Amino acid sequence: MRIRVPEATSLAMALAIPDDKGAGLWTCIELTEPADRWRIVERVMTAGTDVDLFDDAADRLIEKITGWKRWEAAFVWRSTLGAWPVIDGDLTMRGVDLAVVPASRVTNTVYAWWRQTLGRDENAWKKFQRDMQREPRRILEREAAKPMDPASFAMLSGAVKQASRKTRSSEVAASTITMPDPIV
């Protein structure tokens, strides 16, 4: 299949779709040449094909095209579309038409708008960053399923043993607490 870089507005719409609504599939369709989209549709229509299969492909494509992790770009775009009249108006007054900014750079443009706007409030900016960088559950589950490399496992095991020795040496002798009789 041939990959294409869509218009900025098409990219934004694909990224705005929630993950539980087939965002990976939609993104893959949007980033594929129209003449090759039948292959994706054929794959989806094949019995037993899981639509979530397209999430990993969409992640790699978005990162290759924009330099952003897909879930981070999606967060930026969902936030942007929620405040579209303000952001579009502000950037248009400055001579920036988001519809003509190349798709590879348009996420950077709206992210810079958020940085400038929220940067005045340290807490708001930290919350935006934290929410943006929150990895989706599918990524966390995939990482958790990977085996730990032996050196890291040995280091972690040693730390647990050392912590358990400290706990045993600092244990307090057992004590008894007597509860008062209930008042009748």
Image (spheres, rainbow, N blue to C red):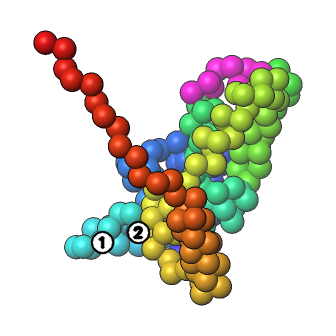
| Residue nearer the viewer, 118 or 58 | 118
Magenta stretch, main secondary structure class: helix
Amino acid carrying mark 2 in the image: Leu
In the rendered structure, does residue 89 fall within the stretch colored magenta? yes
Q: Look at the numbered disc 2 and give the secondary structure of its residue.
A: helix
| Residue nearer the viewer, 31 or 118 | 118
Per the image, the residue denoted by label 2 is 53
Task: Using a 10 Å C-alpha cutoff, classify the residue at mark 1 as few (fewer than 14 neighbours), some (14 to 19) or many (20 or more).
Answer: few
Q: Which residue is found at the position 56% from the left and 37% from the top?
A: 78
Check if mark 2's residue and mark 1's residue have beta carbons within 8 Å. Answer: yes
Residue 26: x percent and y percent? 45, 55
Q: Is residue 91 above or below residue 161?
A: above
Numbered badge on residue 13: none
Residue 7: x percent and y percent? 65, 49
Q: Which residue is found at the position 86% from the left and 25% from the top?
A: 94
- Quadrant of the rendered structure where residue 138 is? bottom left
| Residue nearer the viewer, 121 or 167 | 167
Residue 28: x percent and y percent? 50, 62
> In the image, 146: left or right of 116?
left
Per the image, the residue denoted by label 1 is 49
Q: Which residue is found at the position 35% from the left and 38% from the top?
A: 177
Q: Which residue is found at the position 19% from the left and 14% from the top?
A: 183
Is residue 104 among the parts visible in the rendering?
Answer: yes
| Residue nearer the viewer, 24 or 1 | 24
Q: Looking at this view, name the residue that lies furthest to the top.
A: 184
Task: Using a 10 Å C-alpha cutoff, classify the residue at mark 2 as few (fewer than 14 neighbours), some (14 to 19) or many (20 or more).
Answer: few
Residue 5: x percent and y percent? 66, 59
Q: Quadrant of the C terminus?
A: top left
The part of the chain drawn in magenta is: 82-91
Amino acid carrying mark 1 in the image: Thr
Q: Look at the numbered disc 1 and give the secondary structure of its residue.
A: loop
